[in-house]
Structure formats: C-alpha cells, structure tokens
Image (cartoon, rainbow, N blue to C red):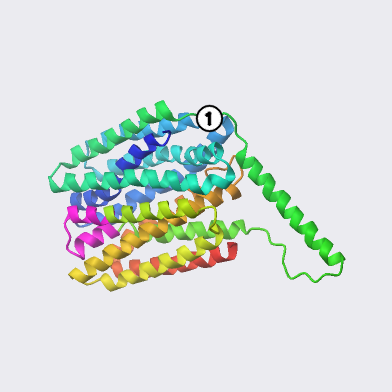
Amino acid sequence: MWRLGFFFHEMGFGLLSIFLPLYLVKINPSNGLFYVGVITAIALFAAIPASFFWGYLCDKTRHYKRYILLAFLTLAVLLFLFAFTTDIALLIIIYAVMSIFHAAHEAPKNILISELYSHRDWGKHFALYEGFTEVGTLIGLVLGFFASFFGVSAMNTLFLVAGLNFVAFVLAAIFVVDPPMIFERSLVSMEKRVGFAFQGVFLASRMMDGIRVDEKLKRENVTAFCCGLVLFSLALNILWPPLPIFAQLNLGLSTAVVFVIFVLNSGGSIVGYALVGRTSEESNGRASVSRLVLFRSMLAFLLLLALRQSSLNVFLTIGVVILMGFAFAVFIVHIEHLSMELIPAGKAGLMNVLIGVGAAVGSFAGPFIAQALGFLQVFVVAGAIFLAAFVFFKIFA
C-alpha cells in the first residue's frame, strides 16, 4: 500500500511529460523546440545538487517519509501556480524549483525498497514498484489523450496534474512508514567485501599449492558503471524530448494520437517490468545491462527509417517506441538494484546525480540539434552515444 501515493504522482507526471513539450511549442511555435531544451536542461541541472543533498539528508536523519511528503506537496502547489502563466521565463523558474523538490522523493523511494526487503528480493520489488507506478504513468497518458481529444484547456490540464500530486501527498501521508531498522544495505556491502577477500584467499591458496589458476581476481569497475550510466542518460534525453514533436511535425499526427503512441510505450514498459520481476533472481543483471543498452542503440538507428511521412513510418515509429519502453523497464530495474549494491549509505542520491548530469545535457542538446540540424542528426547522435555507453557497461560487467 505504501506505493499508492507514488502511483498518483506518476500518473500526473506521465501526463505532464508529453503535455509540456507540446504546450511550449504551442505557446511559441517558432522557437518551441529550443525552449523545450532550455526548460528541461535548467530544471535537470538544478536537480543535480538537489539529488545528492536529499539523498545525503535522508540517510543522515534516517527519516524518509518526510522528504516524500515534501516533494509531493510542493509539486502540487507549484503545478497549480504553473497554470496561471504563459511567460516562458517564469515557466522556466517554476519548473526548475519543481525539479529541485521532485528530486526529494527519488532517493528515499530507493532506500525504502532496499531496506524494507531482503537483498535477494530487491530485483523483484524494484520491478514491482516500477511496474505499478508505470500503470499510473499509462493512466496519466490516457487522461492526456482524453483531455486533448475533448479540447480541455491547458490551465485545466495543469490543474489536473496538480490535483493528482496532492492526492499522492495525502496517500503517502497515510501509507508510507519509515523502516523500523536500517541495516540491509550495510549487510550487502559487508557481504561483498568478505566475498572479495575470500575469493582472493582461495586463489592464493591454489597458487601456493602449485595449481594453475586461470580465474582472475576482479573487483567491479564502479567508474565504468558511472560513466555508462551518464552516457545512457545523455543519449536517452537527446532522443526522448524531441520524439513527441517528431511524431507531430514529421509524421503529421494529432496531439491525441501522440498521446496514444506514448500510452503504447508505457504498455511496453509494463510488460518489461512484469518480465524482469519474474526472472530477477535467475538473471545476470550486469550482463543484461550492456545487452539492453546495445539494443537501445539499434532502436535509435532504426528511427532513421521513419523520417519520411507515411503510414508505414508511423507504424515503424510505434513499434520502436514500444520496444524502447520494454528495454528501458528491464534496464532501470537492473540499474536500481546494482546502484543499491555499489553506492554506499550516505550517498544514496548519487545514482540520481549521475542520471541528472546526462539528462540535463541531453535534454538541451536533443531539441537544439532537432531544431538546428534536424531529426536525422538526433537519431544518429543518440545511437552513437548509446554505443559508447554499451562499451562502458561491458567493461563493468
């Protein structure tokens, strides 16, 4: 039940994720793509120190619920204010402040999962959380479709998003409870150190006995993991923010149909979460991550075939977007699991910082490249950076 508030929060932000870029293009048709990049990049840059700060603070105080409530309530208030202006400068300021407080719920959410459940069940419960909240995102996208189809005003749409976040605040206040004991991540860290030492002693004893040893003592390359995560986030955010506008402008689709495409993307994600939740104990997360990033690169290059307006290219784009949702779902569950193993207590916000660095640069670069050079260059650059991320994750694995 503690996930219920997050469900309504993601419902609101699922709607907002597609509504916002289309709304900015509507306000300023000539420079809309540029403003999409600016507003997203500034917000994400603002969230980078905030992610580390909230992660450190919640681990330091060992209180998590209060930061989740702060995030949801502040977002509800700011989204309500967001509805009363079309001034781009003011929208950028409000959205940046929203991003700072939005980061307050990310690290506490990950810690709740890692401390409420045993290490062997982390993959299953991360998948359960992500799959459950992805259903909320899907419902938010469906609401966006109906709002667009029936001509609901931008102000009322933003009121709806604000209301959903207020419902999230109320439900989190009722159901979220801080873990009674905080020790699971420390046990995992200790287990990894002991396992590494045991492996070293075992190999040394075999060598001293004159037995040939082909196995190498290898410590996980955390630097490669971090670089891969930044590059993946960079490529993802170069590709993703321009996609709704690509579907509308290049494929000639209405706003309502654009929402339908991203509803299908969310459906692909739900299937991915369900699959990884069932196989999390058997799967090798380290190897899966690199394969998923390579697959994502191939999908980005595949979009090059959809650059000309035709019904066939519409179906190709839909298929790619669905597969992207599936691949991202499996990827993010493995990444959240691995990050809780690799990142020590007190630095729980580091994963969000790494993702935020790539997202901030990518969210500006993607729309800028699309407006200045075209969508072809967006797909090529994103695919190439996904390939670079694959190399780093391969080194880590």
Q: Residue at x 54, y 52 (%)?
A: 281
The quarter of the picture where residue 322 lies is bottom left
Residue 311 located left or right of residue 342: left
Amino acid on which the number 1 mark rests in the picture: His
- Tell how many labels: 1
- As drawn, is 266 to the left or to the right of 122? left
Q: Residues within 10 Å of mark 1 (few under 14, many from 20)?
A: some
Q: Secondary structure at mark 1?
A: loop
Left or right of 212 on screen, residue 311: left
Above or below residue 20? Residue 168 is above
- Residue at 12% of width from left, 45% of height from top? 150
Give the farthest residue toward the top: 174
Quarter occupied by the C terminus: bottom right
Q: Please identify the quadrant where the N terminus is shown.
A: top left
Residue beneath the point at 87% across and 66% down? 209
Q: Is residue 363 visible?
A: yes
From which residue to which does the magenta span run?
243-262
Q: Main secondary structure of the magenta part?
A: helix
| Residue 88 image position (x, y, % from top left) | 26, 45
Residue 386 lies within the magenta run = no
Residue 361 locus on image (x, y percent): 42, 56
Residue 205 location, quadrant: bottom right
Q: Residue furthest right?
A: 209
Query: As rendered, which of 255 and 45 lies closer to the eye?
Result: 255
Residue 53 visible to the viewer: no
User: Is 123 above or below relative to 102?
Assistant: below
46 sits left or right of 372 in the view: right
Residue 246, x across and y down, in percent: 25, 62
Q: Which residue is mark 1?
A: 63
- Residue 132 in picture, x, y percent from top left: 38, 44
Query: In the image, what residue occupies the spot 21% across and 71% down?
Result: 312
Assess whether residue 247 is covered by the magenta stretch: yes
